[in-house]
C-alpha cells in the first residue's frame, strides 16, 4: 500500500470481500486467498459469503487452511427469490457495523446485492466500491428478457462503482460490447492462485500419480483424458462425452470427470456415458486436485463460455497438456499450438483429434506441457494478483481522497 501524502504509513484499511458462495472454482479461491494475503500490506479484510447449492461443492477446506473465518449470510444464494431482500438487509447491517473503506464484490449475485448494500450503508466519500467480473452470465444462461434486465442492472451499478475489474481482455471486450461500461473503465487483473501445490516434479509427482491411478483402478500404462468442471449446462459435459466416444474409437484411453452438479444424474445415465462403460470414471469434487492432474495425460475443457478457466491454469501448472474450446477467456490462458490446443466449440471431431494427437505424440505432449507450465506459473501467481490489487486499491483510495 502506498504511503499518505505526508510520507507516513497509512492506518489499516478495512476491506469487505463479498461473494455469494464458496463453491468450487476460481472466484472462491481468489476471495479466500485475498482475505488472508492482503493483511501484511495493511488491509484488515473480512470475507462475507453466502450458501452454496447442494451439488456445487465447497472451498471451505481452503478457508480453514488459510485460517479465514467468513461471515456467513444464509440468505445470500445464487438463485433469485425473496431471500435476496433478506440478504440485502443483512449485508447493509454488516457494512454499517464494520464500516469498511473498500467493498470488493465478486461475480454476479454478490456484485448486485453487495454493491447495493454499500450504496445504502456507506456514505459516498467514505467508500471505495470495486467489482470483479470473473466472466459474466449475461449471455448463454438466461432467456432474452431476463438477460436484458440483468444487463440493465449491471449498467446502472457500473456507473456507481469506483473500480471495475475484468479478469481477461476477452471478458472486458464482451462486457463493453454489451454496454455494461466502456472498455477503458475496466482494469484487467488476471486470476491469481497459489500454484505451488501443482508445480511438483520428480519422484513425489510420480508417486501421487500412481497412488491415485491405483485408487481409481486405472492401469499405469493407460492414457487418461480428464475434464474438471461443475456438471452444469454452460460446461457442456455432453460435448466432452461425445468427443470421448470419438477418442475411444481410436485409442485405449480412459476418461475422468472431476466435479458434480445439477446435471449429474442425467449425464451419468445418458447414451454416450453408457457407451463408454468402465472407461469413464465420475470422481466428483476432490480436495486432492494436484493428484488428479498428475494422474492425467490430457486435460480438456468443453465449455460454451468461460472467464479465466481455473482447470486449464492448474493443469498447465501441473505439467499436463490441455485442449479447450475457443470461448470466452480461454485464449488468455492457452496460446494455441504453443501452450495447448484450442478448437471451435462446434467441432467435436477437431477437439477429439487434438486429444488423439497429443496422446500419440510424446514429443508434442512434452513440448506443450513445458510451455504451459512456464506460462501458468508466470502469469497467474497469487503474488502477482496481490500486487495488482494493492496497487489498484491504493490508486482508488488516493482518487477518493482527492
Image (spheres, helix red, strand yellow):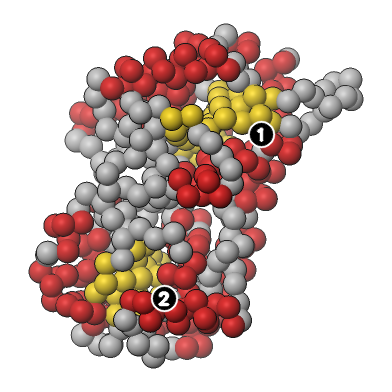
User: Considering the numbered disc 1 on the image, is that residue within a helix, a strand or a loop?
Assistant: helix
Q: Position of residue 244 (x, y in %)?
A: 25, 74
Q: Compared to 140, does 326 lie above or below?
A: below
Toward which corner of the image does residue 252 lie, by quadrant?
bottom left
Q: Is residue 246 left or right of residue 190?
A: left
Residue 337 in sight in this render: no
Alpha-carbon span between mark 1 and mark 2: 41 Å
Instruction: Give the residue at mark 1.
Output: 392
Which-is-in-front pick, marks 1 and 2? Answer: 2
Quadrant for the C terminus in the image: top right
Q: Residue at x 77, y 23 (%)?
A: 11
Q: Residue at x 55, y 66 (%)?
A: 198
Q: Position of residue 227 (x, y in %)?
A: 34, 66
Q: Is residue 186 left or right of residue 300?
A: right
User: Considering the numbered disc 2 on the image, is that residue within a helix, a strand or a loop?
Assistant: helix
Density class for disc 2 (Cα within 10 Å; few <14, some 14-19, many ≥20) is some
The mark total stands at: 2
Determine the residue located farthest toward the right in the rendered image. Answer: 7
Q: Position of residue 341 (x, y in %)?
A: 43, 71
Q: Position of residue 182 (x, y in %)?
A: 49, 30
Q: Residue at x 59, y 38 (%)?
A: 35
Q: Compared to 210, does 45 lie above or below?
A: above
Toward which corner of the image does residue 136 lie, by quadrant?
top left
* Near-viewer residue (331 or 287): 287
Instruction: Give the residue at mark 2.
Output: 212
Amino acid at each position: 500500500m502506498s504511503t499518505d501524502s505526508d510520507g507516513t504509513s497509512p492506518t489499516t484499511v478495512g476491506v469487505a470481500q463479498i461473494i455469494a458462495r464458496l463453491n468450487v472454482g476460481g472466484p472462491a479461491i481468489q476471495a479466500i486467498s485475498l482475505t488472508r494475503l492482503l493483511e501484511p500490506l495493511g488491509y484488515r479484510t473480512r470475507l462475507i459469503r453466502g450458501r452454496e447449492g447442494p451439488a456445487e461443492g465447497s472451498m471451505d477446506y481452503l478457508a480453514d487452511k488459510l485460517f479465514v473465518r467468513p461471515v456467513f449470510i444464509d440468505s445470500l444464494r445464487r438463485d433469485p427469490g425473496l431471500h435476496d431482500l433478506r440478504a440485502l438487509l443483512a449485508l447493509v447491517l454488516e457494512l454499517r457495523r464494520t464500516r469498511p473503506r473498500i467493498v470488493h464484490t465478486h461475480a454476479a449475485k454478490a456484485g448486485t446485492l453487495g454493491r447495493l448494500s454499500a450504496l445504502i450503508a456507506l456514505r459516498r466519500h467514505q467508500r471505495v466500491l470495486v467489482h470483479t467480473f470473473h466472466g459474466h452470465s449475461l449471455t448463454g444462461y438466461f432467456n432474452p428478457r431476463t438477460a436484458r434486465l440483468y444487463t440493465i442492472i449491471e449498467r446502472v451499478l457500473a456507473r456507481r462503482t469506483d473500480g471495475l475489474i475484468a479478469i481477461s481482455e476477452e471478458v472486458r471486450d464482451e462486457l463493453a460490447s454489451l454496454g455494461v461500461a466502456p472498455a477503458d473503465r475496466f482494469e484487467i487483473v488476471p486470476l491469481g492462485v497459489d500454484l505451488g501445490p501443482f508445480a511438483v516434479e520428480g519422484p513425489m509427482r510420480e508417486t501421487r500419480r500412481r497412488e491415485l491411478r491405483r485408487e481409481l483402478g486405472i492401469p499405469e500404462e493407460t492414457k487418461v483424458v480428464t475434464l474438471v468442471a461443475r456438471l452444469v449446462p454452460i460446461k457442456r459435459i455432453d460435448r466432452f462425452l461425445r468427443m470421448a466416444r470419438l477418442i475411444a474409437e481410436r485409442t485405449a484411453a480412459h476418461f475422468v470427470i472431476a466435479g458434480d452438479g445439477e446435471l449429474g444424474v442425467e449425464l451419468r445415465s445418458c447414451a454416450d456415458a453408457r457407451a463408454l462403460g468402465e472407461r469413464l470414471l465420475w470422481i466428483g469434487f476432490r480436495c486432492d486436485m494436484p493428484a488428479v492432474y498428475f494422474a492425467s495425460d490430457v486435460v480438456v475443457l468443453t465449455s460454451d463460455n468461460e472467464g479465466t478457466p481455473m482447470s486449464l491454469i492448474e493443469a498447465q501448472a501441473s505439467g499436463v497438456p490441455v485442449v479447450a474450446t475457443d470461448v470466452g477467456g480461454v485464449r488468455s490462458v492457452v496460446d494455441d499450438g504453443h501452450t495447448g490446443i484450442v478448437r471451435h466449440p462446434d467441432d467435436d471431431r477437431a477437439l477429439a483429434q487434438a486429444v488423439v494427437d497429443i496422446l500419440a505424440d510424446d514429443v508434442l505432449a512434452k513440448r506443450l506441457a513445458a510451455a504451459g507450465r512456464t506460462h501458468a506459473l508466470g502469469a497467474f501467481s497469487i503474488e502477482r494478483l496481490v500486487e495488482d490489487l494493492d496497487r489498484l486499491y491504493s490508486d482508488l483510495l488516493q482518487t477518493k481522497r482527492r
